[in-house]
Image (cartoon, rainbow, N blue to C red):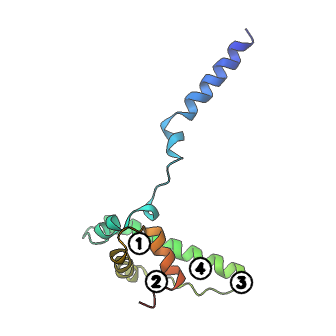
């Protein structure tokens, strides 16, 4: 009879691990992982609801990079563009490299390589 509680506990743990919410944690998602082909489509949309998640994600990412750089050495050369300035810059980079994703485009923006274009 001692093995029955152990077996029930093991079955409960197995069911919990195989639930959709547990398996969803294993798959990264979000605006940063969107391919540039999708990003171009969303940013070209007239609907604000299509554009806003991508632009706010990119602005938040750049702001975070700038904050960390400032915290580490007291200065930051990361430019955080205004919300309205992000769209044309992201579109230009995504159109130049359609197989990239928003995360890598934002990294290019933070490194300054995209500013010199």
Circle 3 packing at 10 Å, graded few (<14), some (14-19), many (20+), is few
- The residue at the point 66 percent across, 87 percent down is 75
Instruction: Write the residue at 58% across / 73% down.
Output: 64
Q: Which residue is mark 4?
A: 66
Residue 61, position in %: x, y? 52, 71
Report which residue position mark 2 lands on. 81
Residue projecting furthest to the left? 46
Separation of marks 2 and 3 at Cα, in angstroms = 21 Å
CA distance separating discs 1 and 2: 10 Å
Using the image as rendered, state which of residue 84 and residue 97 is in the foreground: 97
Describe the element under mark 4 as helix, strand or loop: helix
| Circles 4 and 1 in contact, beta carbons < 8 Å | no
Residues under labels 1 and 3: Cα distance?
A: 27 Å
Disc 3 versus disc 4: distance between alpha carbons? 11 Å
Mark 4 → mark 1, Cα distance in angstroms? 16 Å
Locate the C terminus and report the quarter of the image it occupies: bottom left
The residue pinned by badge 3 equals 73
User: Which residue appears at 37% of the width and 68% of the height?
Assistant: 52
Along the viewing direction, whichever of 107 and 98 lies nearer the viewer: 98
Label 1 sits on residue: 55
> Is residue 18 positioned above or below 113 on the image?
above
Kindly identify the residue that appears in the image at 33 percent across and 64 percent down.
38
């Amino acid at each position: 009879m001692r093995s029955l509680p152990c077996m029930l506990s093991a079955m409960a743990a197995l069911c919990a691990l195989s639930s959709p919410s547990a398996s969803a944690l294993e798959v990264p998602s979000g605006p940063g992982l969107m391919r540039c082909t999708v990003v171009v489509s969303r940013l070209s949309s007239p609907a604000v609801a299509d554009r806003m998640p991508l632009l706010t994600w990119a602005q938040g990412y750049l702001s975070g990079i700038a904050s960390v750089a400032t915290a580490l050495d007291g200065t930051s050369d990361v430019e955080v563009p205004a919300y309205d300035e992000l769209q044309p810059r992201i579109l230009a980079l995504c159109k130049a490299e359609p197989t990239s994703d928003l995360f890598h485009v934002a990294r290019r923006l933070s490194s300054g390589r995209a500013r010199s274009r």
